[in-house]
Amino acid sequence: MDIKDINIPILSKNIKEGETNKNIFESKGLLTINLISSPGSGKTTLLENIAPILNEQGFPCLVIEGDIATTRDAERINKKEIKCVQINTHGICHLESKMIRKAFEQLDMVNEKILFIENVGNLVCPAEFYLGEHEKIAILSVTEGEDKPEKYPLLFKESSCVLLTKVDLLPFLDLTEDIFISEIRKLNKKAPIFLMSKKDKSSYMEFIEWLIQKHLSIFGGER
């Protein structure tokens, strides 16, 4: 038996558990977003900034944080008065569907409409494991370099949209946003690409609107 033969049943079981998760999320009207990126690209900062705005607009959020160790990210989110639970994988480089279901059961859901899953910082393994999400989103910071999509193609091929973060640092790099966009477009020609900087809060608004429209398209209703 080779490695591929071993991987097939592991992934198949995870997919089946992921579908169970999705059925649970949909029964509760939750748009579920799987955020994937390298460590330090700005996933937690993104959530700190967009979750309060989504709450104000009538789309309150829940968050599941994934890390190998510590509860630091969950503590940051909880300070924003957003319900959040931490998963520590203790060495595993990705989250799996069964972990998500156990974590979700710990969340006291009331009227939340969006569940964010902040995956373990890694561009490889998390892209392979379906968690029951509606949308998989890739996050790339400009400080990582424009070559990351080509080096880690699966994530960028499968993502519903791509967030390019820390764009305020572009003037200090020998790169332009057009270079990043062209590299992403080689792999994914349709996904919207949103440029973001924590120094410019308005840069989050297009992505927030994209999330709201996704929720409305799946679950209906009005703003």
Image: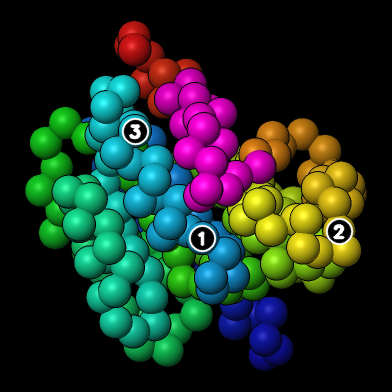
Q: Amino acid at mark 1?
A: Gly
Q: Which quadrant of the structure image shows residue 77?
A: bottom left
N-terminal of the two: label 3 or label 1?
Answer: 1
Which residue is label 3 attached to?
Answer: 53
Instruction: Tell me if 154 is positioned left or right of 181 in this view.
Output: left
Q: For the stretch drawn in magenta, what is the main secondary structure?
A: helix
Q: Residue at the front extreme?
A: 172
- Residue 150 shows in this picture: no
Residue closer to the observer: 98 or 166: 166
Which residue is label 2 attached to?
Answer: 175
- Residue 202 is a magenta residue: yes
Find the distance from the CA under tag 2 to the CA under tag 3. Answer: 31 Å
Query: Which residue is located at x 43 percent, y 25 percent?
Result: 212
Q: Which residues are magenta?
A: 195-213
The location of residue 196, given as percent across then percent down, is 60, 45
Q: Residues within 10 Å of mark 1 (few under 14, many from 20)?
A: many
Q: Which quadrant of the structure image shows residue 154?
A: bottom right
Q: Amino acid at mark 2?
A: Leu
Where does the C terminus fall, quadrant-wise?
Answer: top left
